[in-house]
Image (tube, grey):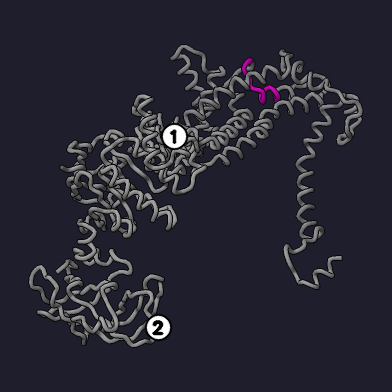
Amino acid sequence: MADATVSMTGPRGPKPKRRFSPTNIMLYGTLFVVAVYYALPLYVMIVTSLKGMPEIRLGNVFAPPVDITFEPWVKAWAEACTGINCDGLSRGFWNSVQILVPSVILSIAIASVNGYALANWKFKGSEVFFTILIFGAFIPYQVMIYPIVIILRETGGFLGVQLMGSIWGLVIVHTIFGMPILTLLFRNYFTSVPEELFKAARVDGAGFWGIYFRIMLPMSLPIFVVAIILQVTGIWNDFLFGVIYTKPETYPMTVQLNNIVNSVQGVKEYNVNMAATLLTGLVPLAIYFISGKLFVRGIAAGAVKG
Amino acid sequence: MHSVEIKDLDLNFGSVKVLQGLNLDIHDGEFLVLLGASGCGKSTLLNCIAGLLEVSDGQIFIKDDNVTWKEPSERGIGMVFQSYALYPQMTVEGNLSFGLKNAGTPRDEIAKRVARAAEILQIEPLLKRKPGALSGGQRQRVAIGRALVRDVDVFLFDEPLSNLDAKLRADLRVEIKRLHQQLQNTIIYVTHDQVEAMTLADRIAIMKGGAIQQLASPEEIYNRPGNKYVADFIGSPSMNFLEGVLDGDAFRVGDQTFSTVGYNFKSTASGQASMGVRPEHVVIGDAARAMPNTVDTTVDIVEPMGSDTLVWAPVAGNRFRIRIDGQTAISTGDQITIGFDAARASFFDAGTELRL
């Protein structure tokens, strides 16, 4: 077909590519297998959560549901029992939201100011301070669990409020544990902002907070989005701190999910368990989808180059 | 009256001494250029004057006011940076008015000053744009405008043209000169570009290793460099140096002897020395034979540059550059006679490298 023209003029323009070359087959084949491997459990969870118990007993794990029912989802959200409480995951969800929102806002607010100060307002000992902070990121959580229990109990008693077992106690713990990595993140980002911009703002008479709010903040949307992704997923998925520092009424969603799935009362309701797990995973999933777009936009908004 | 006065300024970064015992007086309305290779401390000095770096010792006066401990915004200075440093999220107008807003200037006064600066710099049509939508030259104008609206006595320029391409740089250079003639402010201008320094400056301070090598007018620096470093640094192509021995009216390099008649020695000098001759002060052909010193040599390399041609021809075993008119027909291997006058040369002591 193209032979005639090719032989007349010789190679010209883009080199034709073979669609089914061995390389392509290997590449797409591997990608397909890996994708299936990762997606299959999710598929099983979704189809199981939409089946009724009789259908599940048939044992066809991969079969799509014959009778689609949303009953398990409703039950997981509002009726599933953990111990004596039978109000489903909904309570855990609202607990998690109450823990998440202040934790994310507090930790990011403090860490961004920390990072900004460490990057732009070097003071005597700032490097030492930073090193200690980063070192904190490498200390295993297990070591700190019990001391924090004591600290929360004692300071709570000292201030006359109940910190241990309350949502605010957990908020404080999340804020503190987010500090090293977030401070590092923000410090590195603010270090990459041209120093001359900071100098220009100082000549223009802006102070510590003036430069932070008027110059640095508007330029750092991308890094804030990254920090939000990190914190929302981290705090939402946290189980360890949630189970230790709260009590049954204030358990976050993850802890409650565990209790629902592991409490054995008669028949094991796989469909409800699957629905409950999917519900718990929805928030981080939503964050990835929403912020992915914001992230790209944030980078595109970029700084002025020379 | 002194506009900026620097007394015994020291600046250390840890154990590294960047500036040491530096003194500098800058007159009112003067255009002073700090010139030097990178790492010589010129930008550091400017940052000290601006108050962006804390000095280790010494004092800085601006308009006879000791500003050593004052914040940059309180010093009565405006600064223009190499990378423009425009606030990317603000419009041009926002960039210009940011400093005035911080100072609590009344709104109508801000509008007046922004309008005036925009008119002077011809950036009125750009006021509503963001810096990202401006070209390099426009950005630098806005950056200058930001210093202008502050209505200050002293402008500090930190290599403002280094990020621009050659043509734009030449255009803006003239504009900065025009601006200075119009406003008559004191300007301290840091650059590593000797053309900028020569064309703009009332006086040039050549810096090396944190110390000022020579502080003088461009003519003085070009014609009577104070030491060998300055002589070598200023001038493009740079000066030819011949090492030899001074003996009365003669300067001997190997088996060549040159007459030093006409050169104005500071005191009678003899012994090891080096003679510097600028490539543009050397002539060839008939004109050369009329000169006090002549050498016969062979052309080694020819570098045509359009308006001029740079000819390399060895003199007494040393490489020697000669700058001649671009229209002269010359090629490698030609036998030529070159000539120069010692009156326009420079002699430096071989040990101290100071001008003799």
Q: Is residue A12 above or below residue A153?
A: below
Q: Secondary structure at mark 1?
A: helix
Q: Is residue B100 above or below residue A11?
A: above
Local packing at callout 2 (Cα closer than 10 Å; few below 14, some 14-19, many 20+) is: some
In the current view of this chain or complex, which residue is farthest to the left?
B268
Q: Which label sits on residue B147? A: none
Looking at numbered disc 2 in the image, what kind of residue is underneath it? Answer: Ser
Q: Chain of mark 2?
A: B
Is residue B233 a member of the stretch shown in magenta? no
Q: Secondary structure at mark 2?
A: loop
Q: Position of residue B259 (x, y in %)?
A: 16, 81
Looking at numbered disc 1 in the image, what kind of residue is underneath it? Answer: Glu
According to the picture, the residue beneath numbered tag 2 turns out to be B331
Q: Which label sits on residue B93? A: 1
**How far apart, in angstroms, are the residues tagged by discs 2 and 1?**
57 Å
In terms of sequence position, does the residue under pointer 2 or pointer 1 come before the other? 1
| Residue sitting nearer the eye, A220 or B135 | B135
Q: Chain of mark 1?
A: B
What are the residue bounds of the magenta stretch?
A249-258
Residue visible at 21% across and 57% down in the picture: B217
Question: What secondary structure do most residues of the magenta stretch adopt?
Answer: helix
Residue visible at 28% across and 58% down in the picture: B198
Give the quarter of the image for residue B209: bottom left
